[in-house]
Amino acid sequence: MGLISGIFMGMIFGIALMAGWRHMMGYRSSKRVAKAVDIKLLGSLNRDDLKKICGDNFPEWISFPVYEQVKWINKQLGKMWPYIADAATLVLKESVEPLLEEYRPPGITSLKFNKLFLGSVAPKIEGIRVQSLKKGQITMDIDLRWGGDPSIILGVEAAMVASIPIQLKDLQVFTVARVIFQLAEEIPCISAVVVALLAEPRIDYTLKAVGGSITAIPGLSEMIDDTVHTIVEDMLQWPHRIVVPIGGIPVDTSELELKPEGKLTLTVVKANGLKNKELIGKSDPYAVVYIRPVFKVKTKTIEDNLNPVWDQTFELIAEDKETQSLMIEVFDRDIGQDKKLGVAKLPLAGLEADTAKEIDLRLLPSHDMLKVKDKKDRGTVTLKVLYHPFSKEEQMIALEAEKKLSEERKKLKEAGVIGSTMDAIDGAASIVGSGVGMVGTGIGAGVGAVGSGIGAGVGMVGSGLGAVGSGLSKAGKFMGRSITGQSSSSKKSGSTTPVSNGQENGGEKPI
């Protein structure tokens, strides 16, 4: 009896054990299947889906497996950072300080470093992607994050205001940098390095006045923000880049440098329904247009009108149609600092070659709407655009003309005609002539410069820096176009862009 009961209990126990094992294996199998389904779903997500889930600060290698983690580089970078920081501080001071002066906004007379130290916290590389896009080159995309502890103090001076030390605190940088190595057959096997930022970086910081008030200069915080944004956009953001020859090897870097790709003929027709910024009367609007911030041009000012008609034509150069955009900013001319009425952006990638097009764009308070609380309608602006891609011959003419234009803008700044090389030029000072038609080399006859390059070209009084009436009335030959200004009986003066209104006929006048 005991034997039979033992056998029976053993059979029951064995069956229960087998049933439990089967249940457990089935449960594990279902969990594996569910996990596989989840992984498959995650694998099917694109960059935009991941941004919605993780936010803007996720490392690039999460969404793109080609980005490799490089913990060993971060470890070595942390050890080397004290030495790198000291060397980088000297380089930044020498290279960035002239840019601060060149790009400083109107209203600020001096902008320089009082103190610059990069701190003790090294940047972190989240991922690296290595690829070969062209023979003889290695292209490396670096996902970079830096939440450091630098000590940066800017010395800011404005008219009738003593120098105010402004400290940049809590600096954070998030960006993806592209580094291109140009290979060579001789040691060190690299003849040049190209550095650019693939997209607009996110740069966060707070400003604090040291021993004073930041409100002593109205709008100072916005001015510094605009300066930082403009330097990055015009110098580093792709397609713009920095080309650095390496190793003392004679090398032609012209193929690596940015070149004009096409010409955009733009007519700023009109604006409708602008927001009134005046307490008495109506705004006096004018428009500033540019592709690169260093080549800004602006329309004439239409007084006391919220539906202005400018009907002025400009010619702008594009270096990379696929990534660049036309920027439009509408201002209200006012005493002191002009007020921004709205901005708009037109990507050049959507334009067909040699096809005229009329476009209505809605004006926004800012290009970065995340920082704007007032999202009310700002009106619309109407444009006519025509994009013409350059031939090789036209490209070389435009490249030389662009370089000459940069030099002339610097001369105008030195002569006091404009306050900064970032100021918009009145009257559509085009870089290239009609259809790229130039005289002689395409430049010589277009620049009516005598002596210093300004004197005879600018009709001035005495030393060449005279002013007519209350305005800055100037006339001169400039890059195959005339820049003219005339004293106005405007009820307002003192625009942030210290150049008077453009030609009343609204067009460009060839020499």
Image (tube, rainbow, N blue to C red):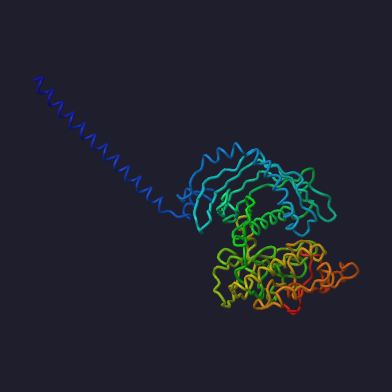
Tell me if I can see residue 322 in this picture.
Answer: yes
Residue 372: give x, y in percent of width and height.
63, 57
Front residue (pair 139, 269): 139
Residue 444 in the image: above or below residue 215: below
Residue 487: give x, y in percent of width and height.
84, 73
Taking 302 as reference, is 85 left or right? Answer: left
Front residue (pair 324, 490): 324
Report the number of numbered marks. 0
Tell me if I can see residue 303 in this picture.
Answer: no
The C terminus - image quarter: bottom right
Residue 326 in the image: above or below residue 203: below
Residue 15 in the image: above or below residue 502: above
Front residue (pair 101, 165): 101
Residue 222: give x, y in percent of width and height.
71, 55
Taking 367 as reference, is 55 left or right? Answer: left
Taking 88 as reference, is 66 left or right? Answer: left
Taking 417 as reference, is 52 left or right? Answer: left
Residue 349: give x, y in percent of width and height.
55, 68
Residue furthest to the top: 2
The N terminus - image quarter: top left
Front residue (pair 228, 412): 412
The part of the image, by quadrant, that contains residue 242 is bottom right
Residue occupying image coordinates x 58% and y 65%: 320
The part of the image, by quadrant, that contains residue 259 is bottom right
Residue furthest to the right: 462
